[in-house]
Image: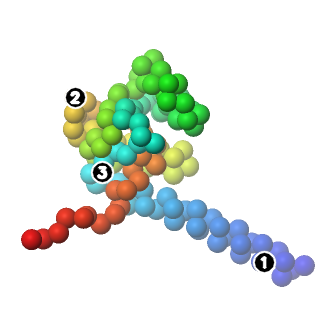
Amino acid sequence: MKKKIVFIAFIFLCSSLVGMSSYAKYAELVGKRAEIHGPYCWDTLGVALTQEHFALMRSALETGDKKLFLEVLECYNILRIEKKTKVFVVYTETIARRAQVVILTGIYRGMSGWIPLEWLDGNNKPSSFRDS
């Protein structure tokens, strides 16, 4: 019985560490420039100015309904941006799955807000530029 409990505790600990390592890539982006990569083939994305509006945006995203997502962008305090907008990552929250960013390009340059962590995927890859 004691071995079974130790084994279960070991499995639980290992699974927790695996889950945490998947978010470690986002923590590495804090204090760095990044590019926003949104879901699917959507060109219009959003940066929520408040955490409350981020929650609304996240809920609309989780439905997968592009029309609903665009309605949320129009009706709430959310900046509409394009994919590949350059940002500076200020802070990441793994539990809430969000990142606070400052926009570096476009008409909202200098403004800050919240985006889903997943939109930062692809920013940890080594550069594909080669020296000539």
Residue 73: x and y in percent read 43, 24
> Is residue 21 something that shows in the picture?
yes
Which residue is identified by label 3? 34
Taking the spot 32% from the left edge, 32% from the top edge, the residue there is 81
Taking the spot 12% from the left edge, 71% from the top edge, the residue there is 131
Which residue is identified by label 1? 6
Secondary element type, mark 2: loop
Whole-number angstrom distance, CA of label 3 to CA of label 1: 42 Å
Secondary element type, mark 3: strand
Taking the spot 35% from the left edge, 27% from the top edge, the residue there is 79
Outermost residue to the bottom: 3
Q: Would you say the residues marked 2 and 3 are in contact, meaning their CB atoms lie under 8 Å apart?
A: no
Quadrant (top left/top right/bottom left/bottom right) for the N terminus: bottom right
Which residue is identified by label 2? 107
Tell me the tag on residue 83: none
Outermost residue to the right: 1
Q: Amino acid at mark 3?
A: Ala
Outermost residue to the left: 132
Residue 44: x and y in percent read 37, 32
Relative to 91, is 87 on the left or the right? left
> In terms of image quadrants, where is residue 5?
bottom right
Whole-number angstrom distance, CA of label 2 to CA of label 3: 17 Å
Secondary element type, mark 1: helix
Task: Please report whichever mark, 3 or 1, sits nearer to the chain's N-terminal start.
Answer: 1
Q: Amino acid at mark 1?
A: Val
Crowd rating for badge 3 (residues with CA inside 10 Å; few <14, some 14–19, many 20+): many
Q: Amino acid at mark 2?
A: Ile
